Image (cartoon, helix red, strand yellow):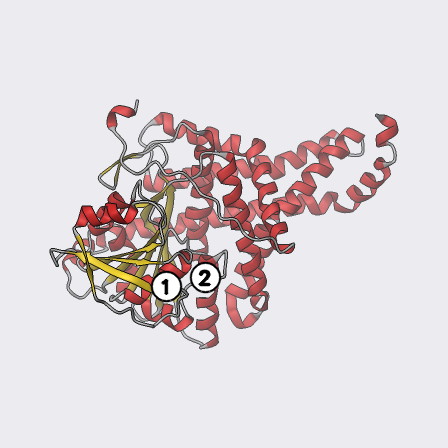
Amino acid sequence: MDDVLEPVTPVVEAIFAGIALPVLVYFLIINSSYLVLVVAAALDFRRSTRQLPFAGREELLGSGMVPGVSVVTAMFNEEAGIKVATQAMLALHYPRHEVIVVDDGSSDDGFEVLREAFDLVEVPRRMPQDLQVSEAATSVHVPRNGRTRLTVVRKANSGRSDSLNVGVNFATQDLVVFVDSDSVLDPDALLAIVRPFAEDPVRVVAGGGVIRAVNGCVVRGGRVTEVRMSRNWLARIQVVEYLRAFHLGRAGWSRLKSLILISGAFGIFRRDVLVEVGGLDPTSIGEDFELVLRVHKHMRRLKRDYRVQFVSEPICWTEVPETAGVLRKQRRRWHRGLWETLWAYRSMLLNPRYGSIGMVAIPYYWLFELLAPLLELFGLVLVVLGTLLGVVDVGYFLLFMAVAYGYAILVTLAAMTVEELSFHKYPRWRDLLSTLAAAVVENIGYRQATAIWRLEGWWQSLTGRKQEWGTMTRTGFDTSEEERP
């Protein structure tokens, strides 16, 4: 073994001599940046919590002056949960909203489920041409009673983005909310996410809400009636991930006025702005990220005063993958979309014309989101190999593990503390302990595996391989109380 490793030792020693300090500094900066976002999010939560009793939500609910909302969702083979999801969207607490479901050429019986549940009848309605689409509507259906504000549009399969653009064309209200058809919204979600638009209707152009994992929760009638942790460890770790990245991370960026990513599972836009920028890009894998960057670029070029805001109150509950195979495809797709979008908007990088978006947010995503898996795996492999070869002393190895992983665990625990003190979503101690355990377990195997999968997605893009979307089996939303311990 020594004969095999002997020629490698000088190479590892030379590389390590050059990167020993930069590796530590990189992990120190990335974890510190996460901590800054957590602190910024905590300040934002504190302000929101203080304003909540005076937010006037009841007045908003009874007001005829609030902006109308079109809730648009695209479904593709969502037979298991589309009925409950649609019922839940129609039952959202809001004075004036409509629901538009676009059937993207499903091959299952999802449309038949909707037709039977809502007594749908076909109507001769032409689709407006505000947004250009690849596949136009083949038929439009509404409930026979004429009162239920539901429109179901059927079309040939052309993907989620093109289907949502079709939905925008049919939307009749000033605001458009994109919701995944496999998600569940809190009853007051629309009231919460619309509030910034009601308070500042001229400047606020887009917003996003909280995304949480519904796995393990008790769901009845399209409502999460009890928040619980999943028994599946992959799902548990993703609860921690979503909390850190999709909740506190985006709340922090919003506080810094530099939010550039809104989850497609729950995002809201002014319809006129969507039409101005051309809607979602069907050719983009990271279509949600790409749309928000396009909005920023459009507004900055026109020198408009505008805001893109994250709202920490409304929650969108969504199923997360519980198998490594599905999770791998998801993370490959996410990272490929990140790379392709950042590359497409590279002209905004370090460009003072785009303010904090170009000078802070986009450089951050390049350095700490895109390059993170590459640098993390390279640093980890080099340090472990160097330690085995005797090039790296034990002291440096322990320091590396403390800065790269120990600090990351502390940041995650800080995020969980902020979230629990602010919202207290998990009432059972058992679930809180499971969350704490997941924050530690995340760094042992899971984090390294997702880094590899993200690099696979990047490599697929660089080599021009066709994107495979993959599927995730849905269990549907309704769960029986008797099935839960």
Q: Is residue 260 above or below residue 447?
A: below
Is residue 286 rendered to the left or right of residue 51? right
Q: Which mark is residue 272?
A: none
Q: Residue at x 56, y 58 (%)?
A: 340
Give the image quarter of residue 62: bottom left
Query: Horizontally, is 84 left or right of 231 in the view?
Result: left
Q: Is residue 149 visible?
A: no
Q: Identify which amino acid the numbered label 2 is placed on.
A: Pro
Of 429 and 67, nearer the camera is 67
Q: Secondary structure at mark 2?
A: loop
**Towards the viewer: 281 or 367:** 281
Q: Position of residue 262 (x, y in %)?
A: 42, 56
Query: Residue 297, image x and y in percent?
Result: 48, 70
Disc 1 crowd, CA 10 A, few/some/many (<14, 14-19, 20+): many
Other-residue count near label 2 (Cα within 10 Å), few / some / many at <14 / 14–19 / ≥20: some
Query: Residue 229 appears in which quarter of the rendering?
Result: top left
Q: Which residue is mark 2?
A: 282
Q: Which residue is mark 1?
A: 165
Q: Mark 1 and mark 2 in contact? Answer it, CB < 8 Å.
A: yes
